[in-house]
Image (cartoon, rainbow, N blue to C red):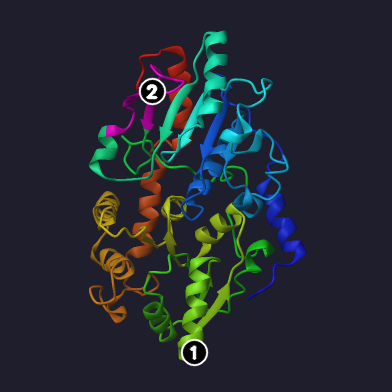
Amino acid sequence: MPSRTPSALQASAAALVPAHTQSPPASEKVLLWDIFCQVIDNYGDVGVCWRLAAQLALRGHSVRLWLDDLGPVQWLAPGAAQGSWPGISVHNWPSAQHAAPVPEIPLADVWIEAFGCDIPPAWLQSQVDAADTQGRRPAWINLEYLSAEPFALRSHGLPSPVLQGPAKTWTKYFFYPGFSPASGGLLRRHEANTTPVPTWADPSLSAYAPGAPGERTIVLFSYASAPIASLLQALGRSAPPVQLLVAAGQSADAVRGLLALLPGLRHGSLRLRFLPFLPQTVFDRLLALCDLNLVRGEDSLAQAVQAGKPCVWQIYPQEDGAHEPKLQAYLQAIAADTPLRTWHAFWNNPPTTSPAPHALAWPWEADSAWPRNASDLATRLAQNTDLCSQLIDWAVLRGANSTALRP
């Protein structure tokens, strides 16, 4: 496993911390946002919430990010927990044993409960009291999971009356990210407009992928249930040669376990490189450079498709099979062709039901339409209003018109 040098760490951290925030448009009201996130799903939830917080801060807003586990932020956004990101403060989850927060915490303009988490009752009670005193209520948003399923479009922007607890009679609103112009949109790479297009000449990136001439590069970021052994066997026979960047966590554990059991997997034209836990912007840039991205989770999928490079999504597998309709809805939303559907069938199904690895088409094959299709998809998605902009517009409108459901 390549070590992470101090210079690489410093470069990554420096790239993550913006030198200044951007001034919001004259028509955009500056708001104070509370984002609540419980870190329960393989860090994808905190990845989305951090990206949203960073985008809001870059547009001149102030954000308090409330987490029940500050650990992932230490590598996801170095320095954030210590207050080095302008406009963002990171806080421990307000729990019952800590009672209500101190009175000096001002009432926010917007509350975001991410992925179905609930604001703790003691904290909520104190903020409801403050709202009653000030005669105003924060806009309250339930930020849901990314989905292309029809119900998500039907539910996007709908009200959810609060029927009990300190905020009884208040109203939350559903916000669904998605790939359609009618959805809540996708989060952009939060520093995309402030940094140059990434290249392998950047030492903070080439340190993780020092490729040889003619070598292709693949990111492997998957759950342990992925058919990784079949993938390694196929890559070992690949031409041209391939270097596989194995993400820390379940992917790395699975690959190392396979190598211990089946040492013959590591041969031929395949080189393995094990990555450490990377800052979010560094991982974003790798996705923008690699020839194929095998990703899991919501945040990585959103960034991979917007990077315009070939990618395959491993959806979180559920025992009742509820993930399959979600996967099919995604493939339909991006107008996936037969080779891409074959790849997703291979990557998301048990080996006994998935296509054989030799049936897979690689994006670097001479007749492959995959790179062009991936670029076209990114261009199409870029025409949609992004999630951060939609949330800001909605929150401003909600503050001016209590009956508004959508921007």
Residue on which the image places disc 2: 164
Q: Which residue is the extreme one toward the right?
A: 6
**Residue density around tag 2, few if under 14, some if 14–19, many if 20 or more, within 10 Å:** few
Q: CA distance from mark 2 to mark 1?
A: 58 Å
Q: Secondary structure at mark 1?
A: helix
User: For the point 39% across and 25% down, which residue is it?
Assistant: 172
In this rendering, the label closer to the viewer, 2 or 1:
2
Q: Nearer the viewer, residue 130 or 302?
A: 130
- Looking at the picture, which amino acid does disc 1 mark? Pro
Q: Which residues are magenta?
A: 155-174
Q: Nearer the viewer, residue 13 or 94?
A: 94
Q: Where is residue 215 shown, x and y percent of the image?
A: 52, 78
Which quarter of the rendering shows the C terminus? top left
| Relative side of 8 to 186, left or right | right
- Looking at the picture, which amino acid does disc 2 mark? Gln
Q: For residue 73, say whether it is visible.
A: yes
| Relative side of 184 to 137, left or right | left
Q: For residue 28, say whether it is visible.
A: no
Magenta stretch prevailing secondary structure: loop
Q: Where is residue 343 shown, x and y percent of the image?
A: 31, 68
Q: Where is residue 75 shown, x and y percent of the image?
A: 64, 55
Question: Which quadrant would residue 390 be assigned to in this image?
Answer: top left
Residue on which the image places disc 1: 263
Q: Secondary structure at mark 2?
A: loop
User: For the point 50% across and 65% down, which residue is it?
Assistant: 290
Q: Are marks 2 and 1 in contact (CB under 8 Å)?
A: no
Q: Is residue 177 magenta?
A: no
Image label count: 2
Q: Where is residue 67 shown, x and y percent of the image?
A: 57, 42
Q: Is residue 168 magenta?
A: yes
